[in-house]
Image (tube, helix red, strand yellow):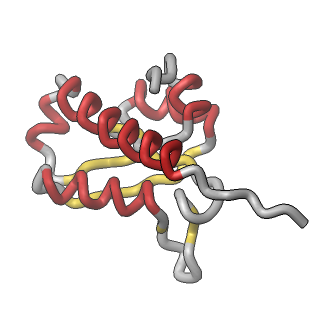
């Protein structure tokens, strides 16, 4: 059985792109509701460990969930995490069900309108 080595360059690039995307989301938000509200509603794509998953207590956990909580904390808001299917993310953003989407996966960004070049 062959073991795959972790490509730290690729992992670092993915984490860096997640941080950059989150900064663009925050900077690009023009809704007064997001700026004046007390809750930051974040959409997450549930897939598998370690990125986003439901733990034993049915609470969203993983790297993306932790990042969303830190983002809300930096904005002085209470995080409300919502797990969404890939096909429901764009509609949830348009309808105002969520304020932003946090995801490191390129196929999620492609479904929302284009993945950033890394």
Image coordinates of residue 104 in percent, x first then y, are 48, 42
Q: Which residue is drawn at 43% across and 47% down?
A: 12
Expressed as whole percent of the image width and height from the top left, the position of residue 6 reads 61, 56
**Which residue corresponds to the image point at 56% horizontal and 76% vertical from the top-left?**
55
Name the image quarter holding residue 118. top left
Please state, as top left, top right, bottom left or bottom right, where the N terminus lies in the image: bottom right
In the depicted structure, whether residue 35 falls above or below residue 12: above
User: Can residue 97 be seen in this snapshot?
Assistant: no
Vertical side of 21 occupied by 74: above or below: below
Compared across the picture, whether 54 is left or right of 62 comes to: right
Residue 29 x %, y % = 21, 27
Q: Which of 71 and 43 is in front in this view?
A: 71
Can residue 63 be seen?
Answer: yes
- Whether residue 63 sits left or right of residue 49 in the image: it is left
Q: In this view, does 99 lie to the left or right of 76?
A: right
In-front residue for pair 21/99: 21
The residue at the far bottom in this view is 56
Residue shown at the point (22%, 34%) measured from the top left: 26
Image coordinates for residue 15, horizontal then vertical, percent: 41, 46
Question: Which residue in the rendered view is the most extreme toward the right?
Answer: 1
Query: Which residue corresponds to the image point at 49% horizontal and 45% vertical from the top-left?
Result: 9
What number of labels is visible?
A: 0
Q: Residue furthest top?
A: 113
């Amino acid at each position: 059985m062959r073991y795959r080595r972790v490509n730290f360059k690729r992992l670092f690039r993915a984490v860096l792109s997640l941080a950059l995307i989150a900064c663009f989301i925050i900077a690009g938000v023009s809704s007064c509701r997001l700026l004046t509200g007390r809750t930051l509603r974040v959409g997450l794509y549930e897939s598998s460990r370690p990125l986003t998953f439901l733990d034993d207590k049915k609470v969203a956990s993983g790297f993306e969930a932790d990042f969303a909580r830190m983002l809300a904390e930096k904005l002085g808001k209470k995080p409300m995490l919502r797990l969404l299917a890939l096909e429901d993310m764009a509609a949830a953003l348009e309808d105002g069900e969520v304020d932003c989407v946090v995801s490191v996966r390129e196929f999620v960004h492609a479904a929302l309108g284009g993945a950033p070049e890394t």
